[in-house]
Amino acid sequence: MSTQHKGKYAETKACEYLNSQGFKIIEQNYFAKKIGEIDIIALKDETYHFVEVKSGLEYEAAVNNITKSKLSKIKRSADYYLQTKKLNVAFCIDAIIVVNEELEFLENITL
């Protein structure tokens, strides 16, 4: 399975999970000009969730791919999204780690 295919598979699993937990998927693969990309933007209880999806052969490797600079880009991309949509709402940055068939949701991550 190619890396791109694995990424799509992980994002699909993540969306299925979020939907099952009562989240509404607003956008996928949102691209903020010259800043970065947000894998999933979801809404639950009036809070926007900017979700980074990581997959890997093992949990540690996938989690360690969420670096300080990656988080910074996600935060700037989230700010850009909120500004362009003229939204003044509560939000958080989350991660979903997919390893094989296992999925872990890490809410409100910061470094």
Image: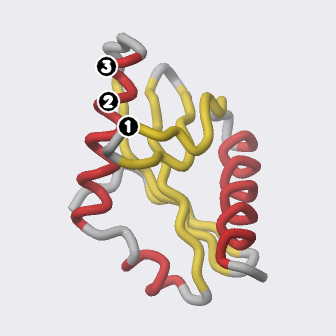
Name the residue carrying label 1: 33
Can you tell which mark lies on residue 80? 2
Asked if residue 94 is positioned above or below residue 80 in the image, the reply reads below
Question: What amino acid is found at the position of numbered circle 2 in the picture?
Answer: Tyr
Q: How far apart are marks 1 and 3 (CA)?
A: 13 Å
Question: What amino acid is found at the position of numbered circle 3 in the picture?
Answer: Gln
Q: Do the residues under discs 2 and 3 have CB atoms within 8 angstroms?
A: yes
Asked if residue 96 is positioned above or below residue 24 in the image, the reply reads below
Q: Is residue 10 left or right of residue 75?
A: right
The figure's colour scheme reads secondary structure
Name the residue carrying label 3: 83
Question: What amino acid is found at the position of numbered circle 1 in the picture?
Answer: Lys
| Helix, strand or loop at mark 1 | loop
Q: Distance between the residues labelled 2 and 1?
A: 9 Å
Quick one: label 2, few (<14), some, or many (20+) residues within 10 Å? some
Asked if residue 46 is positioned above or below residue 101 in the image, the reply reads above
Q: Do the residues under discs 2 and 1 have CB atoms within 8 angstroms?
A: yes
The mark lying in front, picked from 2 and 1, is: 1
Which image quarter: residue 19? top right
Residue in the image at 37% along x and 18% along y: 84
The mark lying in front, picked from 1 and 3, is: 1
